[in-house]
Image: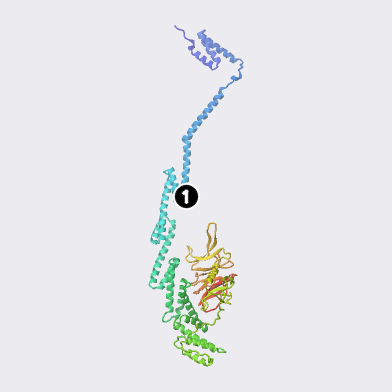
Amino acid sequence: MPRNDPRDDPLYAEGLAHLQSAEWQEAVRCFEALAARTGDDPAIAAALAEARFKARLDAGPRVRPRRWAFSWRPIIVRILLVISVALLGVLGLNLLNQQISPAVAAAQRARRIEALVKDGQSNLEAWKLDEAAQAFGRVQALDASNAAAAAGLAAVEKRQALKLACAEADARFAAGDLTGARASYTDLAVTAPGYCNATGRIAETNDRLRRDDIWKTAEEAYTAGNCADAIVLYKQVQTADVGFQKETILDHLYDCHMRLGRELVEANPPAPEQIPEALNLFTDALAARPRDIAAGLEQRLANLFIAGRQDYQAGRYADAATRLTAIYQARPGYLGAALIDPLYDALIHNGDGYLALATPDYYRAWEEYRQACALPAVDLVLCQGRLAALRDFLTPTVTPSVTPTITPLPTATPYVPPGPPPSATPPPPLASLRNQIVYRSANDQQPGFWVMNPDGSNAHYLGEGKDLEKQYDALRAREILSPDGRYRVYTTTGDSDKSPQLYIQANELDQYDNAQTWQVTRVEGLNYDPVWAPDGSRIAYVSTHQSVGGDLWVIDPDGTNSWNYTRNTWEWDKHPTWSPDSRKIAFWSNREGTKQIFVIDANGQNLKKLHAVPWDEYDPIWVK
């Protein structure tokens, strides 16, 4: 039977394992036990000897070279740490790529979408529809299902439709299709209240439609010759829109006022009690055409008749004769007997008055009676008797005729000494006549420009012609400037004005090429003829705010402290001009029949006529 190899014994393997692990005592134990069972086996004996040797070495003192003092544990720890860090890095990178990066990207996209939605909504509110559509489109490119973007694009589309509807309505309004425009604005007011100023446009359209209806009715009345109704309707149109058909309305108003006024003047039999009404009509005609000669003549004759009749009834026969004679010379058939009878009687009374003096003035009495006999009166017996009675008191050289065909004198007005004859030398420049008043005169002998002192004295003729006209216009142009020349006051009708108003504008442009401008007056009626006081504190002008003809007003340049200096009923006060010291204002007025020049203190007191003549004098400029 073969012998078993002791190296196959488990104790042998265990001993080798202890030996390799430097567990010398345990190796010795295993090999001794195996040797006891197997005997003197050489392999076992060698292993036991090696184990005992190493055990002895281990038990005794050991001296090892320094270069062999090497520890594997720290190295292994570091290697494991590096490997761990590497593994963690790999795991972190994998986590970043698979979870964190997508989350960050999603958050960034969400913020981008939120910013674009806000941008789109902001542009939508500002009606920047193209920009809003672009913003919402970008949102949909990032998130096709985004509800805010879809709602925003729907709102953009709706507002684009509203914008188009507003443009179409405005186009209809501008083209004069008021009915269509009103329908469009009404739809807008229903679908989008407050947009496109639809409510205001509807009101404006209704006003224009009413204006057009009134205009149509006024034109029909005018064509039919119904001037009374036409005047009322035309004025309603002017109130609604001062600029609408302006020239046509002024022409028709002029024509209607002249027609109605002349009907009253030419009534048969004459109706002198209607002349004040005729005067108002002629004044209104002049409002339509301020410098019309025919209307001015009619107004002057009516004024003279009213004043002359009042003088006659009050027993002021000299004044009555002066005014009524002026009418007779201008138009002999004016009012027929209503003019001739009081004129005839006034001349007789004047003649009787000259005879009743302490020292009778037979010659002047004779002239009064002669003029009376020259009238086409029905009964001339009285004046003829008076002339016959005076023959014995006159010198033989006087051979007056007593027939009614005697040619009347050119004027029956009191004698007014004429100014000195014009010099052969050219008149002085108007600008050199400082503190004197230059004005226009309708003097039959010397029409044109005159000049006088501020108290009305030393009136003398300057001449007429283009050169004087240019100088006069230059003086007037300077009147509208502020004292430093930086601003000008003028009349215009602004977008929101119903009638002409005063404005002030700088003569220099600012850095944006704009001229500073502000409105001075904001009242109903016509406001015009503004002139700036030399001290710069006030502006005088003419306004129909409280009268038909026009009053003299004064206002501060900032639009405060307006004051009516000459509140009138039918009279006209026009063309103000300041004195060089800003203490007085000169202007012309028809308050006494003819156009005459007056002066008033800057506080609105002490109204005074400067120059009493029987012809028109007007448009003064106080040279500064």
Single out the residue that lies furthest toward the top: 1
Q: In which quarter of the view is residue 181 placed? A: bottom left
Estimate the x, y position of residue 85 in percent, counting from the top left: 52, 30
Q: Residue at x 46, y 40 (%)?
A: 106
Estimate the x, y position of residue 364 in percent, counting from the top left: 53, 87
Residue 286 seen: yes
Single out the residue that lies furthest toward the bottom: 392
- Quarter of the image that includes the C terminus: bottom right
Q: Residue at x 48, y 37 (%)?
A: 101
Estimate the x, y position of residue 4 in percent, counting from the top left: 47, 9
Closer to us: 76 or 2: 76
**Colour mapping used in the image:** rainbow
Amino acid identity at mark 1:
Ser
- Quarter of the image that includes the N terminus: top left
Mark 1, residue position: 122
- Number of residue marks: 1
Helix or strand or loop: what does disc 1 sit on? helix
**On screen, residue 533 above or below 278:** above
Left or right of 596: which side holds 199?
A: left
**On screen, residue 405 above or below 496:** below
Q: In which quarter of the view is residue 250 placed? A: bottom left
